[in-house]
Image: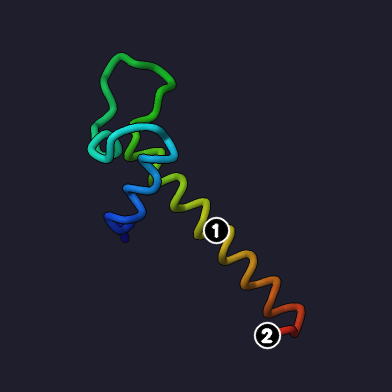
Amino acid sequence: MWVSDKTMAKLSMALHIEVYQLLLPQIEGVANIPAPAEILLNLQKGLKKNIDLQFDQLFKSGLF
């Protein structure tokens, strides 16, 4: 699963970087600085987890 080109454009604008920088691999020898693509994947995972949690809470509440 991957994000759309529009989402990548919005993320790059928010991060003040060029879109291609989201796809650059991590440079060896640079410690504790994740690659932009890794940041993007972590954001995606966090958003999915948050959305899943909100849907679970909505269904459990009986409002849906």
Disc 2 target residue: 64
Tag 1: amino acid: Lys
Frontmost of labels 1 and 2 is 2
Numbered disc 2: secondary structure: loop
Q: Name which residue lies at 46% across and 52% down.
A: 45
Residue 44: x and y in percent read 44, 52
Name the side, left or right, on which 18 lies relative to 13. Answer: left
Q: Name which residue lies at 39% across and 32% down.
A: 16
Residue 24: x and y in percent read 24, 33
**What whole-number distance in Å separates the C-alpha atoms at marks 1 and 2?**
19 Å
Tag 2: amino acid: Phe
Quadrant (top left/top right/bottom left/bottom right) for the C terminus: bottom right
Label located before the other in sequence (1 or 2): 1
Q: Name which residue lies at 64% across and 67% down.
A: 54
Q: Name which residue lies at 75% across and 84% down.
A: 62
Mark linked to residue 18: none
Disc 1 target residue: 49
Quadrant (top left/top right/bottom left/bottom right) for the N terminus: bottom left
Name the side, left or right, on which 2 lies relative to 31. Answer: left
